[in-house]
Image (cartoon, coloured by chain):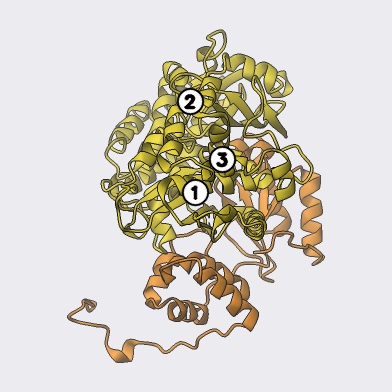
C-alpha cells in the first residue's frame, strides 16, 4: 500500500515514512511541538483562531465546515469547562486515512489537540477512537505517556500556565458515533443516538459544556498552520479549500493507499490512471465514489477527459462531494446495482433506530434490494426505491438518512442500465442479461 | 395482558432476581480505576469497562459481569443492557475463542470478501453469525473496518489480517485450529 504526497510537499504525511515515526524523539527532530511552543510563547487564543480562519481549513470528517468558524462559536465567557474532542471514529466505508495518521504520527494529533485546547480554553480533551482500532488506542496511550513525561501533556505544559490533559476513549462498533452529537452521547456512556441541534456542541456539548468536535485530519493540520501561518497554508490549496487533503484510495487500482494532494489537484483522471498506478488488470474504469460511501457515485464519463478538480468546489461541480475523501474506484466488472445494494445493507445495519424515516426506510430499502436480487424485480421498482429515498432524505433526524439515500439516488440516475437489467420481468429478459446476472 | 411497570407501579420486590457479582483481580481493578479517573462522570467509562469485563468473563457480558458494571458505575442493570445492546462489539452472548470477523463492505466486497467468507464457512462448517459446537470459532460478516486499501481483510479479536488470499487465510485458520494463534493486539 502506498502512503505519500503527490503534487505537493508532504505536510500531514511528512514523517510517516521515517523509522520510529511514532516516537517523541523522531517527532521533535522533524519539527514536532514547535507549533505548540510558538503558541505558548506569545500567541493569544484569538491569534490561534485567527490563523486557523485564515488557513481556510475545512473539517475533514465529511461535512467540510470551516474549522476556524466552528472554533469561534465557543463562548469565551462561559464559566463551564470546555472540551475538545477528536473524532477518530473513522467508519465511513472507503476511509482509512485517520488510521494511518494516528498509527504513524500520533504526536501530530496530540500537538493539534493541545493547540486547539489552548485556543478554546479547554483543559480536558478526549480522542474518541472506534473500538476496532484498539491497536491505535494502545499507540496513542503510549504517545500521550511519552508526552506527559516530557512535560507536554498535563500540568504547566512547557513551564507555562497552560495545563491540559489528553485522554483516549474507545467506541464499540457503531458508525453513527461518527456523527458528532451521537459521539458525545456515546462518550457520556449512553447509546449513540444523535442529539437535536441546536444547541450545537459549541454551546452545549459534552456534559452540557461548550465542546468542539474535530476530525483527526483536521486537528493534525493545525500544527503546520501555526508554523507556516494560516495564509501560507491556504495558498497550498484554493481560496475556499485551504491546504492539502489526505485521500484514502481503494478498489480496482494498482496502487491503493493514502495520498496527500493539494486541494484543487488538477485532474481526477490523471490521479487514477497515473498516480494510483492505473486500473487493476488493465480493465476499464466504470465508476468512482470519491468521498466515502455516502457521496454521489460518478460514472467514468464524468471523469475521463473532464479535468475534475479535486477539492470541495470542484467535486460539487462534477456532481459529487469530497466527503471524507474515501476514494473507491470500480472497474467494468462491478454491477452498480450490486454495489448499491451492498452500501444500503451497510446503512441499514448502522441506522441507530432513533428516527422512523431512517430506521424503517433503510430496512425497507434493503428488503426491496433483496427481492430484486432474487430475480423478482419489477420495472416500477426503480421509482419505488427513489420514492423511499425521498421519504428519508431531509426527513431523518441526522445526516445518516441522507447518506443512505444519496448513493441510491445517484446510482439509479447515473447507471440506469445496471438497474434496468434487474428490473425487467424475467420472461422478457434476454438470455444475455440473465447470464450476466 | 401483561402488567405495565411505571414509576407509580414499580417492579414488585419479588420480581428482582438477586445476581451474584463478578470479582476481579487487583490488577484489573487498578485498570478500571485508571479509566474511571479520566472522566468527571463515572458513566462515561461504560464502554472501556465493558471491554474489560467481557475480556475477563470469557468474551461476553454475563449477568455477574453486568451486575458488577452497574454497581461500579452507579447505574441500573437496565442502563448497562441499554448500552450493551446498542454496540456491535459488546457481546451479550458467548462467542468463540477466535472470533473471525470478515469485512463485507464495498471495497472489500469488490476485491473478494465473499470468497473469504465462503472459505471460512466451508472450513469451519458454520455460517456467518454462528459458533462452532466446540466454542472455538465464531464467524461474522462485519461492516467496514477501515482497511479498504488492503482489502480483502478480516479481524480476529483486535488483530487485523489484510491483503488476504486463500493460502494466507488457510494458514491463519491452521494456527487457530492448532491453538497456536497469538493475539498481537492487547485489548
Counting from the top left corner in percent of width and height, residue B55 is at 62, 71
**Between marks 2 and 1, how big is the CA–CA gap?**
29 Å
Q: Residue furthest bottom?
A: B14
Camera-side residue of B21 and A186: A186
Instruction: Please give the label number shown on residue A38.
Output: 3
Circle 1 sits on which residue?
A86
Residue at left offset 52%, top offset 16% = A309
Q: In this image, A53 relative to A153: left or right?
A: left
Circle 2 sits on which residue?
A297
Counting from the top left corner in percent of width and height, residue A68 is at 41, 35
Residue at left offset 81%, top offset 53% = B171
Task: Give the mark toward the camera: 3 or 2.
Answer: 3
Q: Residues within 10 Å of mark 1 (few under 14, many from 20)?
A: many
Chain letter of mark 3 equals A
Q: Earlier in the sequence, mark 2 or mark 1?
A: 1
Chain letter of mark 1 equals A
> Color of chain A here?
yellow
Amino acid at each position: 500500500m502506498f502512503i505519500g504526497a503527490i503534487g505537493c510537499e508532504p505536510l500531514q504525511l511528512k514523517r510517516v515514512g521515517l523509522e520510529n515515526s511514532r516516537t517523541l524523539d523522531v517527532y521533535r527532530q522533524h519539527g514536532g511541538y514547535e507549533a505548540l511552543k510558538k503558541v505558548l510563547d506569545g500567541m493569544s487564543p484569538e491569534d490561534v483562531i485567527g490563523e486557523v480562519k485564515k488557513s481556510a481549513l475545512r473539517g475533514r470528517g465529511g461535512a467540510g465546515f470551516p474549522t476556524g468558524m466552528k472554533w469561534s462559536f465557543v463562548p469565551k465567557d462561559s464559566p463551564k469547562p470546555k472540551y475538545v474532542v477528536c473524532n477518530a471514529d473513522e467508519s465511513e466505508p472507503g476511509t482509512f486515512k485517520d488510521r494511518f495518521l494516528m498509527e504513524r504520527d500520533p504526536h501530530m494529533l496530540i500537538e493539534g489537540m493541545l493547540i486547539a485546547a489552548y485556543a478554546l480554553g479547554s483543559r480536558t480533551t478526549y480522542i474518541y477512537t472506534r473500538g476496532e482500532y484498539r491497536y491505535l488506542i494502545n499507540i496513542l496511550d503510549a504517545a500521550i505517556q511519552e508526552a506527559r513525561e516530557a512535560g507536554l501533556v498535563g500540568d504547566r505544559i512547557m513551564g507555562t500556565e497552560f495545563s491540559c490533559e489528553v485522554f483516549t476513549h474507545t467506541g464499540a462498533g457503531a458508525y453513527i458515533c461518527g456523527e458528532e452529537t451521537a459521539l458525545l452521547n456515546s462518550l457520556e456512556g449512553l447509546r449513540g443516538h444523535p442529539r437535536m441541534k441546536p444547541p450545537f456542541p459549541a454551546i452545549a456539548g459534552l456534559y452540557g459544556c461548550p465542546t468542539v468536535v474535530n476530525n483527526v485530519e483536521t486537528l493534525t493540520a493545525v500544527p503546520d498552520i501555526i508554523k507556516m501561518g494560516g495564509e501560507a497554508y491556504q495558498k497550498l490549496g484554493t481560496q475556499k479549500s485551504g491546504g492539502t487533503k489526505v485521500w484514502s484510495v481503494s478498489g480496482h487500482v494498482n496502487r491503493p493507499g493514502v495520498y496527500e494532494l493539494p486541494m484543487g489537484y488538477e485532474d481526477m483522471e490523471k490521479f487514477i490512471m497515473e498516480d494510483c498506478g492505473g486500473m487493476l488488470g488493465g480493465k476499464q474504469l466504470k465508476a468512482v465514489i470519491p468521498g466515502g460511501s455516502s457521496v454521489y457515485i460518478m460514472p467514468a464519463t464524468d471523469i475521463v477527459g473532464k479535468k475534475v478538480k479535486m477539492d470541495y468546489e470542484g467535486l460539487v461541480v462534477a456532481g459529487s462531494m469530497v466527503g471524507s475523501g474515501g476514494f473507491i474506484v470500480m472497474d467494468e466488472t462491478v454491477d452498480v446495482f450490486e454495489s448499491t445494494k451492498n452500501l444500503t445493507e451497510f446503512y441499514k445495519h448502522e441506522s441507530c433506530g432513533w428516527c422512523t424515516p431512517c430506521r424503517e426506510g433503510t430496512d425497507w430499502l434493503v428488503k426491496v434490494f433483496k427481492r430484486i436480487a432474487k430475480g423478482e424485480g419489477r420495472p416500477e421498482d426503480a421509482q419505488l426505491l427513489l420514492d423511499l429515498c425521498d421519504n428519508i432524505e431531509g426527513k431523518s433526524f441526522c445526516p445518516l438518512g441522507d447518506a443512505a439515500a444519496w448513493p441510491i439516488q445517484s446510482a439509479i440516475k447515473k447507471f440506469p442500465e445496471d438497474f434496468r437489467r434487474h428490473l425487467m420481468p424475467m420472461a422478457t429478459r434476454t438470455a444475455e442479461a440473465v447470464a450476466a446476472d | 395482558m401483561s402488567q405495565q411497570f411505571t414509576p407509580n407501579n414499580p417492579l414488585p420486590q419479588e420480581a428482582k432476581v438477586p445476581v451474584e457479582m463478578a470479582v476481579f483481580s487487583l490488577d484489573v481493578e487498578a485498570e478500571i480505576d485508571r479509566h474511571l479517573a479520566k472522566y468527571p462522570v463515572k458513566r462515561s467509562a461504560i464502554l472501556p469497562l465493558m471491554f474489560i469485563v467481557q475480556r475477563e468473563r470469557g468474551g461476553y457480558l454475563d449477568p455477574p459481569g453486568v451486575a458488577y458494571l452497574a454497581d461500579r458505575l452507579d447505574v441500573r442493570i437496565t442502563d448497562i443492557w441499554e448500552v450493551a445492546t446498542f454496540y456491535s462489539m459488546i457481546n451479550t452472548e458467548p462467542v468463540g475463542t477466535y472470533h473471525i470477523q470478515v469485512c463485507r463492505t464495498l471495497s472489500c466486497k469488490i476485491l473478494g470478501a465473499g470468497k473469504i467468507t465462503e472459505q471460512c464457512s466451508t472450513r469451519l462448517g458454520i455460517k456467518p453469525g454462528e459458533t462452532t459446537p466446540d466454542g472455538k470459532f465464531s464467524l461474522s460478516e462485519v461492516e467496514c473496518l477501515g482497511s479498504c486499501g488492503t482489502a480483502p481483510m478480516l479481524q480476529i479479536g483486535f488483530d487485523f489480517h489484510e491483503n488476504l488470499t486463500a493460502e494466507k487465510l488457510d494458514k491463519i485458520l491452521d494456527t487457530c485450529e492448532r491453538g497456536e494463534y497469538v493475539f498481537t493486539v492487547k485489548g
